[in-house]
Every structure is written in C-alpha cells, then in structure tokens.
Amino acid sequence: MSPQRSRMILSILMLVSVLTVFLSLAGFLPEDGTAQRLGWIAGDDSGIGQGSDDNQNAVGDPSAPGQQLPTNAPGDGDLTGFPVAEMVSRDDPAGQLDSWPADSSIEQIRTVDLSAWKGRALDASALSGITIFLDPGHGGQDTGALYPAHSSDPIAIESEINLAVARKTKTELEALGATVILIRDTDIWQSIFYRIAWTGHYLVQQFLAELSAAGYQSDRIEDLIPLLDQVMQINSDSEESGGRGLMSGEGASEELRLLLDLQAQYEDALYLSIHCNALDDDSSVRGLQVYYLTGATAYARENELAVDRGLANAAPVYRMYQDESRRRLAGLVHESVLERFPSLKYEGQKSLVDENYAVLRELNLTSVLIELGFISNAQDRHLLTASSSQQQMAEGIAEAVYHYYCLP
Ligand SMILES: [Zn+2]
C-alpha cells in the first residue's frame, strides 16, 4: 500500500470517527442497545400499533373483525418494565393536583378498526365482535330506591327493575350478535368497586392472553391481577374498609393509570350501568337522565375533593377518558329511549350529565350510567315496573349501541 493511499484511508477513518462522536453527542446515535428497544416501543418498526392482517382475540369473541394484533414480535418478546412514564404534567395551576400526561403509559398493541362495523345492517351479526358489560345497579341488601321510600314492604324496588331491564337488554344485544356480560344476574350485593375491579380483571386477562399470543409478556401488567383480586375480596364501598384498594384516594397511582390506559385499547367494548332515580320530597319530578364523564370534570371534581382533604400526598389525576365517545353514547341512549317514551323527557336542568361517578372514573371503557326514570313519580313508576315498557327500554338501549357502532 502506498503512503498516499494509507494517509487517505486514515483521513477517512478519522473523519468517520469525528462524525460518529458528533452525532452521538447530538443524540442521533444510540449509546448502547436501548435505542433499538425504545424503537419498537415507539412502534416505528415492528408493526405494533399499525396493525397486521391477523384478526384474533377480541374480548369474548376470537373471530372478531376489525381488531388487529402484531404477528412478528421482536425476538426478546418481553414488555417487562416499559409501560409507565414517570413524568407528570406541571401545567396545572399551582395548588391543584397534577395530571398524568396525555400520552398512554402503554404501547398501543391492540388496534380496533371501528370502520369495520360502520354501515352494517340491523341484523344478527351487526354487533359481532363487540362486548357489552351490563351492570344492573344495586342488589341484595342494597335495594337502591324504593317506593314507598323506606318501606319494609315496597311495591317498587330499584335493584329488581335494574336487573329486569338489564336482562332484557342482554337478550336484545345478543340478538344483534354482541357478546354480553351481565355483571350480576341474581339478586346479590356487590360493591361498586367490586364491579369495576371485576371488569378490569376480565380485561387484563384478555390483554395478557393477547400479549402472549403475540409473543410478549409483562410483569407490570400481570401484577395488576392481585391488586384487582384484592378489591374484589374486600367487596366494600366504604373507604374505611380499604375496599377500594387500587382505586382508593384522590388521583391515580401508576398501577391504576396503567390499568386505565390498557382499558382504553378496548374500543370494541362498552360498559352500561343501569339505575332508577328517586326523590323523597317531590313526586312530580320525573324523566330519564344519562350520565357520562369527561377528563375535565374528573380533574375538577378530584381537585375539589383533594382541597377538602388536603393536597399533600395526592397522586396525579387521570383524565384521558374518551370524552367524545362517552358523550356520543350518552346522547344516543338518551335519544333512543326518549323516542319510545317521549313522556320520559326530564324537565330539570340537565338530562345529559357530565359527572364524576366512580363507576365511570375507575374504568376506562366508553361508559354511561342510565337513570331510566324516577321510582318516586307515579307515571315513571308505572313504566319502570311494567314488563312491556321495560322491554321497550331494553330495545332502546340496544338500538343506541347499534347506532353507536354501525351508523356514522
Ligand atoms: Zn341506583
């Protein structure tokens, strides 16, 4: 090799190393193997989050359309440790709770293509692949509202009406091809937190099965199972009992945030809580109200509570609910039931209400709580207790779900 040729090669090598050091300092090159790992976490080269042609494992229905999972998992196939981002937003006003950042703490590995349902006819397969959790409020020793109020021999019992309407709704939704899960199908008592923990448990198990089928595993997600078991075992609504477990206190722990972010990937599932209203001192008030929850309201109400109790140790507030989906579903249920019962028009301030109910806050499916009418009002009570009008209410709710998924 001539001296000139050697010098030229040396110069090129030096240039390359100088360039490498520059790029590395400027943050363009990985210092070790982590960049590659972060690369697939960000979903840029693995197909994760962009779907594949492999449709499998929707909630409750392995042949569901529109739901996609990655098929070519990276070799190490281990999600352990990646889900949670530590940083909290500091944009919120001083003296108020922080919020978790808007980005999900977990990679979008479950993509639901909602357009797969759009335009479907109202027939036996319209809602195939869709899972509906139906929650008939109250039960057992917790009767909910009674008529007459506080009577030992009531002629109308909210928990029974809720269950009757929920059962009929289940039949109607199944006739449209949906998978329906009744949270309770007998007259038993379960705490509000039991119901949402049970639903969370169901979804985490589904998610783990889907991860496993795609070649992944995650200790962080598996660790949610015992936390949810704990809530169900204590089965109490009272804070003193510790029954809220994972769902206790103001704000959301990292684990709760992870759970809620995971649930957000189930756009092919809805949660409908069915109730009746009552007003002890005014029997003239009547009508249908549908409740939903947005992130802004969750944040505002959690702040009010935290101010009452002192802000010191409160965790950041979770506010990444699908506001528009929830508002839309509430509007559709309201419209569809009113269409059948115009007399159920609520004359008070609001018939669609954005409210911080635990059942809507501690579960991140698109969800609504339906107050079908007032047991304390004679006309509403007649509708709520008659099997034929319960049936029409059920048809109205099922039609709203059809509308939600299948119409524009
Ligand atoms: Zn109720």
Image: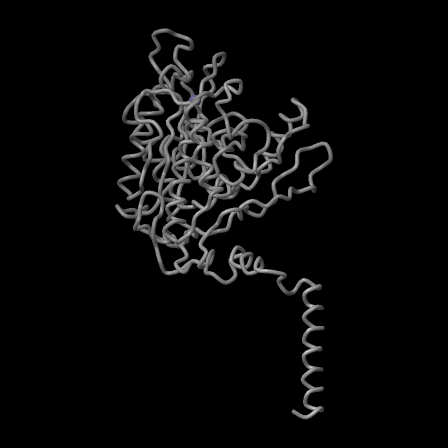
In the rendered image, the residue lying farthest to the bottom is 2
Q: Is residue 361 above or below residue 7?
A: above
Q: In this figure, which colouring scheme has been used for the structure?
A: one colour
* Foreground residue among 186 and 171: 186
In the rendered image, the residue lying farthest to the top is 152
Q: Position of residue 336 (x, y in %)?
A: 39, 37
Tell me the residue at 50%/51% (across/down).
107
* Quadrant hosting residue 66: bottom left
Q: Position of residue 97 (x, y in %)?
A: 66, 33
Tell me the residue at 29%/43% (across/down).
176
Tell me the residue at 34%/7% (across/down).
153
Image quarter hosting the N terminus: bottom right
* Foreground residue among 408 and 105: 105
Q: Is residue 112 above or below residue 363?
A: below
Horizontal arrangement in the rendering, residue 108 relative to residue 406 (left or right): right
Q: Position of residue 189 (x, y in %)?
A: 37, 20
Q: Is residue 377 above or below residue 403?
A: above
Q: Is residue 367 above or below residue 23?
A: above
Tell me the residue at 57%/60% (across/down).
33
* Foreground residue among 230 and 123: 230
**Ligand 1 falls in quadrant:** top left
Q: Position of residue 319 (x, y in %)?
A: 57, 39
* Quadrant hosting residue 87: top right
Picture mark count: 0
Horizontal arrangement in the rendering, residue 362 relative to residue 384 (left or right): right
Horizontal arrangement in the rendering, residue 102 relative to residue 116 (left or right): right
* Foreground residue among 169 and 11: 11
